[in-house]
């Protein structure tokens, strides 16, 4: 992908506006999940080492264009300083004279976080005047928020028209990993896709069929495919309206020689038994599937051992409720071990997916974990992300 290179720019004393994603879960003034914060360390460290004056902009929550103290970014300062090991100052607005005045006092290597972009309704409208007001604060713009780059918002899209614009180090790393997995993968390429509904991942499944050799399905998505094959699934979650769609996807897969792998046994609840495993060939009407069974785990492991690249989105069962996390944990550990042994390039993304891999205590062994949710899915769906396309379209002439 023909993106400009931040590493080629003289940043000494430059005011660098960095779009980040600090929309993280908070409780009692503390970030519950700091993965998005720690993932920014390479970019923050690099800019500081180069002597830039760093201006961080982000959204937090959905204040709907109104000032809401509960959604102030100021509450993140302790978490940022702890994770980054640096002082971070704060600006009470992200545009206007107040923001300009405090930025003028920044010294080389200083970091400031400006107030929630979404306190201004113009942000989500991709308003050009708001983008210009943001742009007046800096000398150049860096997008290090891949996770927000599927949004055509002023701080992601329109701002690139008014400043020399570059991807940050996290953004570059994310694009490289996703491109390696989907655009130039080592074959065979396997995809693990799970979730409750086909309807929410229809574009994803169709795009993956153009790229993968093996499609492993689980969760409610797999249940719908099983039901379309007239396999009993008891009282398990599925989408009746998507049965014909499942059949169409199977036909496309057959025509493209993509193997679809579905569960062959399941663990779940049955009458008075809360945890029982049964083969899908003999599932009673009262059975509710909550996880894949051991035979399915063995089947999935065998198929994954034949792959060289795997892309994963969605936990395989109701991992939040032990012991129905066992299937996801077993497969996660298998992918992690294959990756650690150099036999597999693995990439996973989506909030629930990362939570499941963290629960399995093996997330650090994956080749790459995407902190993005919607942007990760849209990339897998083959869509062009506005934030990335803006960097390409408005690439500085000097690059």
Image (spheres, rainbow, N blue to C red):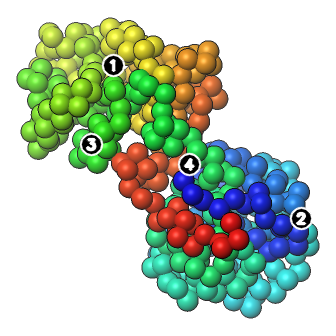
Q: Mark 3 points at which residue?
A: 206
Q: Do the residues labelled 2 and 1 touch (CB within 8 Å)?
A: no
In this rendered view, identify the residue nearer to me: 180 or 112: 180
- Give the labeled residue for mark 2: 51
Q: Name the residue under label 4.
A: 175
Quarter in which the C terminus is drawn: bottom right
Seen at 15% across and 11% down, the residue is 281
Dot 2: element: loop
- Single out the mark in the foreground, 3 or 1: 3
Give the mark, 2 or 3, whose residue is nearer the N terminus.
2
Query: In the image, what residue occupies the spot 55% across and 65% down?
Result: 392
Secondary element under disc 1, as helix, strand or loop, is: strand
User: On the picture, is 4 further left or further right than 217?
Assistant: right
Mark before the other along the chain sequence, 3 or 4: 4
**Horizontally, is 92 left or right of 316 in the view?**
right
Judge left or right: residue 288 versus residue 54. left
Determine the CA span between mark 2 and mark 3. Answer: 46 Å
């Amino acid at each position: 992908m023909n993106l400009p290179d931040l590493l080629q720019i003289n940043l000494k004393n430059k005011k660098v506006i960095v779009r980040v994603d600090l929309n993280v879960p908070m409780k009692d003034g503390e970030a519950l999940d700091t993965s998005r914060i720690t993932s920014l360390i390479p970019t923050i460290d690099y800019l500081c080492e180069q002597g830039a004056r760093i201006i961080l902009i982000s959204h937090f929550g959905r204040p709907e264009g109104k000032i809401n103290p509960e959604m102030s970014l100021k509450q993140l300062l302790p978490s940022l300083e702890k994770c980054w090991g640096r002082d971070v100052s704060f600006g009470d607005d992200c545009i206007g004279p107040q923001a300009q005045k405090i930025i003028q006092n920044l010294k080389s290597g200083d970091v400031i976080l400006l107030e929630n972009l979404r306190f201004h309704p113009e942000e989500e409208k991709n308003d050009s005047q708001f983008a210009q007001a943001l742009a007046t604060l800096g000398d150049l713009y860096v997008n290090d928020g891949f996770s927000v780059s599927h949004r055509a918002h002023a701080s992601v899209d329109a701002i690139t028209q008014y400043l020399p614009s570059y991807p940050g180090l996290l953004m570059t790393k994310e694009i490289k990993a996703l491109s390696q997995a989907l655009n130039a993968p080592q074959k065979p390429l396997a995809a693990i896709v799970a979730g409750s509904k086909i309807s929410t991942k229809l574009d994803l499944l169709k795009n993956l069929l153009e790229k993968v050799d093996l499609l492993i399905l689980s969760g409610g998505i797999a249940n719908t495919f099983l039901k379309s094959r007239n396999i009993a699934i008891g009282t398990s979650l599925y989408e009746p309206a998507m049965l014909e769609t499942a059949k169409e996807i199977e036909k496309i897969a057959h025509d493209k020689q993509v193997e679809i792998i579905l569960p062959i046994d399941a663990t779940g609840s049955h009458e008075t038994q809360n945890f029982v495993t049964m083969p899908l060939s003999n599932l009673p009407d009262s059975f509710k599937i909550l996880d894949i069974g051991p035979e399915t785990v063995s089947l999935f492991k065998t198929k994954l051992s034949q792959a060289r690249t795997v892309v994963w989105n969605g936990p395989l069962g109701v991992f939040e409720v032990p012991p129905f996390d066992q299937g996801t944990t077993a497969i996660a550990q298998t992918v992690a071990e294959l990756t650690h042994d150099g036999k597999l390039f693995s990439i996973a993304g989506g909030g629930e997916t990362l939570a499941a891999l963290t629960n399995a205590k093996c997330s650090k062994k994956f080749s790459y974990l995407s902190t993005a949710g919607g942007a990760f899915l849209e990339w897998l769906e083959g869509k062009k992300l506005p934030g990335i396309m803006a960097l390409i379209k408005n690439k500085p002439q000097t690059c």
